[in-house]
Amino acid sequence: MPKKILSGIVVSDKPNKTITVLVERKYQHPVLKKVMRARKKYNAHDEENKFKTGDKVNIRESKPYSKNKKFEVIGSMK
């Protein structure tokens, strides 16, 4: 099964080797047919601490690094 790849914006880089990424997706409500916007935050592993708040990044599903950290940073989006 392929690994999930998501893109979003870094909202926090406070913990060591960890960033918090806000991922936003749009979908159509099944009954109302209205376009809805869902947001979710993911903790991602950043080995070199090189991404800062406001950066746009791609993250990939990986082995669990901790209880909440199950994604790793692939790179930045241009």
Image (cartoon, rainbow, N blue to C red):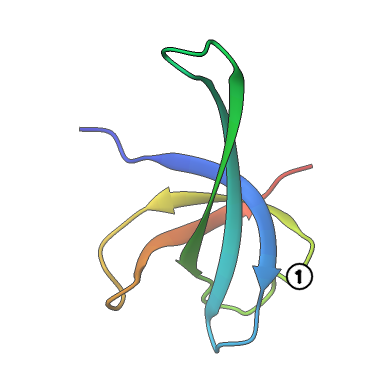
Mark 1 nearby-residue class (10 Å; few <14, some 14–19, many ≥20): some
User: Which residue in the structure is indicated by mark 1?
Assistant: 53
Specify whether 1 is left or right of 59: left
17 lies above or below 38: below
Residue at 32% from the left image edge and 40% from the top image edge:
3
- When asked about the image quadrant of residue 48, the answer is bottom right
Residue 12 in picture, x, y percent from top left: 66, 74
* Residue type at numbered disc 1: Thr
Q: Quadrant of the C terminus?
A: top right
Of 26 and 11, the residue lying toward us: 26
Specify whether 41 is left or right of 9: left
Of 3 and 53, the residue lying toward us: 53
10 lies above or below 40: below
Residue 60 in picture, x, y percent from top left: 43, 49
Residue at 43% from the left image edge and 12% from the top image edge:
31
17 lies above or below 26: below
Specify whether 70 is left or right of 22: left
Which residue in the rendered view is the most extreme toward the left?
1
Residue at 29% from the left image edge and 78% from the top image edge:
66
Disc 1, SS: loop
